[in-house]
Amino acid sequence: MSEQVLVMAQMIELKQDLSIEKPGGKKVFVQFNPESMKVTFANQVAEPKGGDQKAGTAGRQFVGAGTTKLALTLWFDVTAMAKNPVDDVRRLTTEILYFMTPQEAESDKKKLAPPGTRFSWGSFIFDGMVEAFEESLEFFSAAGKPLRASVTLTLAQQKILVTDYSKTTGLVPSRPGQRPFTPAPQNASLQNMAGAAGKGDDWQGVAAANNIEDPLRMSPGALIDLDASVSVGGSVGFGGVASFGVGAGFGAGVSIAPPGVEASAAVSLSSPKLSIN
């Protein structure tokens, strides 16, 4: 199976009307991907003038196209730089501050406006303008230079952004070596779970393959691979001595004798661990 490549988030400069990427615009990859992101949708409403508010007839009215905001935190650490390390973390965060710095407006040269910004991380894309930038500096060097920083960003766009998922199904294709696990319901036994999956005659093998010691008392939510199984066989010999053998990449032999008859047991395990009560 090929190893997956880690996708890093980046900030891309757009034209101020957010229509396209700005030719020759700035592109900055983040040092660490955010741990979480928060997307907020809001409509613009206002109380209408007039009306009998005491009677409850003055309802709110929609007065705008709404807004969508993205909030996230980015981390920077010059001590974790593998290539071209710098002595001050602000040399890195200034690259992000660029996306909030006003510049000559494209529509009116006499006015200033921040650049359009796209935050792109894999399939997540948000186009807007940087509304807020908050930087926290920490971990200072002996010379008093900050080596680590966190930057909290808020991007906004004056409309409700809705991702269209109708063009794709979103179904994850099966991959070689992957098998689904079944969570154990409350008060479930492995026998019942195996029976519901059409493997009722092989529940002992499923228990051995999943290293389950007590198939009658399953922990709620425990993940079980009902497709995994090892062969379990049993035979009864002379004198009432029962012997059992289990095979799944290992060997085990157990002899159980009635009172007055010597019993012996020999277990050889390589993988997985087996418990016989």
Image (spheres, rainbow, N blue to C red):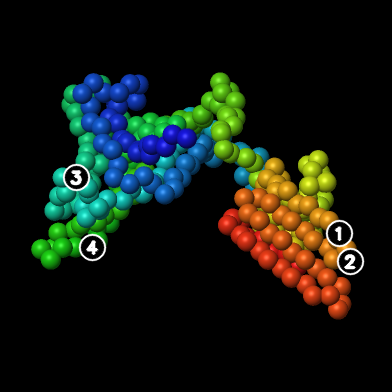
Q: Which mark is residue 37?
A: none
Q: Is 90 on the left or on the right of 173, as rendered?
A: left
Residue 262 position, x and y percent, is 79, 75
N-term-proximal mark, 2 vs 3: 3
- Image quadrant occupied by the C terminus: bottom right
- Residue 147, by quadrant, is bottom left
- Residue under label 4: 139
Q: Residues within 10 Å of mark 1 (few under 14, many from 20)?
A: few
The answer to whether the residue labelled 1 contacts the one labelled 2, judged by CB atoms less than 8 Å apart, is yes
Q: Residues within 10 Å of mark 2 (few under 14, many from 20)?
A: few
Residue 142 position, x and y percent, is 12, 66
Alpha carbon separation for disc pair 1 and 2: 7 Å
Where 148 sits versus 167, above or below? below
Q: Is 19 on the left or on the right of 218, as rendered?
A: left
Which residue sits at x=22%, y=47%?
Answer: 82
The answer to whether the residue labelled 4 contacts the one labelled 1, judged by CB atoms less than 8 Å apart, is no
The amino acid type, in three-letter code, at marker 4 is Phe
Alpha carbon separation for disc pair 4 and 2: 74 Å
Q: Nearer the viewer, mark 1 or mark 3?
A: 1
Which residue sits at x=45%, y=31%?
Answer: 123
N-term-proximal mark, 4 vs 1: 4
- Residue under label 1: 236
